[in-house]
Image: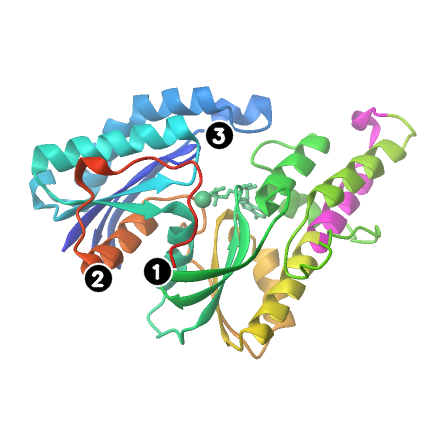
Amino acid sequence: MLTLGIESTCDETGCAIVRNGKDILSNVVTSQIDLHDQFGGVVPELACRRHVDVMLPVIDEAVKQANINLEDIDLIAVAHGPGLIGALLIGLHAAKGLSLALQKPLIGVNHVEAHLYAALMSHAEPIRFPALGVVLSGGHTALVQMHAPDQFTLLSQTVDDAIGEAFDKVAKILDLPYPGGPEIEKLAELGKPHLPLKSGTVKGRPLDFSFSGLKTAVLYAVKGQNNSAIRQSLSQTAKSDIAASFQQAAFHDVIKKTLQASAQIECRDIIFGGGVTNSQTLRNMFREASPDLTLHWPSFGMSLDNAAMIAGLGHHRYRNEQFDACLHLEAATRLPFSQ
Ligand code: KG4
Ligand code: ZN
């Protein structure tokens, strides 16, 4: 069964062709980093327009790279949320157009759930459910109990910034390019994490996340260097020490709460998803902190936004549900986890 997946929830336009939910024949992603870099974050209007410009060429390229014809497709899967409304609509309408023209079923996929599915597509070994899902992306930070690949109970989430968002904002404070995560990881390698920074805690909800206080603490650390807001005057060593301290504080917090949650729901398999799981530093820190747990990471290219994970989860759901959303499918800026 061939599934064509479409991703356009934020600032990446993606199309992928996946056979039987696992075998990735093509996975084309165009990033809009050039467009948003000067603003230090995604500008929704610009993102929409770029999606319009590149959606059809990206679909053509994915079909070409997979060496198939459009008519060979059996199912169309599209990320219909959560995300930016304008961006979602471009992918959704492209998917509906294809579904109508090819007379093939259409299924909507939750982008955040697909991030977790990316790790399942990356591994051959079976996973013992219930497992703990750890979502660490630019828009979401959550711990979920996974009863099956497509069945979840939300355990905790962030009460303010998502972790990737915090990396991007701290990068901006340090005058680093967007997206900030990889830049902070690189800079942190040169620094020492000696600043006493800590992620936030939420009263009465020990598994919830809070990163906005940590981000503000970085802002004060930067300003405090010269008792002024002139960031350019920070030495390179001071900058790398701040990056290292921030990264360590954010990751320590994620590790602590993940271990706590896995003990609480008594599961040994941890499934990771989202752009921040691209960090080798995070993977190393987790490996050291949790030798008794089995960690399932997305493979190379599957951490960041992509359409192969959308096609993969779409295939899985369609096989179980045989549900054709047809033209009724709507874009959803917020979309809860499926239960
Ligand atoms: O999952 P994703 O591609 O998009 C969303 O669905 O949000 O995640 C993008 C986020 C960005 O905030 C980016 O800074 C972060 O992932 N990121 C990283 C690293 N690589 C990407 N954060 C920390 N360390 C990294 N190496
Ligand atoms: Zn994402």
* Residue 56 falls left or right of residue 331: left
The quarter in which the C terminus is drawn is bottom left
Q: Nearer the viewer, mark 2 or mark 3?
A: 2
Find disc 1 in the rendering and name its residue.
150
Hey, what amino acid is under mark 3?
Ile
Q: Secondary structure at mark 2?
A: helix
- Among numbered discs 1 and 3, the one appearing first in the sequence: 3
Q: Is residue 92 visible?
A: yes
- Among numbered discs 2 and 1, the one appearing first in the sequence: 1
Magenta range is 229-249
Q: Position of residue 51 (x, y in %)?
A: 35, 26
Asked if residue 244 is among those painted magenta in the image, a careful observer would answer yes
Q: Secondary structure at mark 3?
A: helix
Find disc 2 in the rendering and name its residue.
320
Residue located 61% across and 31% down the image: 177
Between 186 and 180, the one lying in front of the other is 180
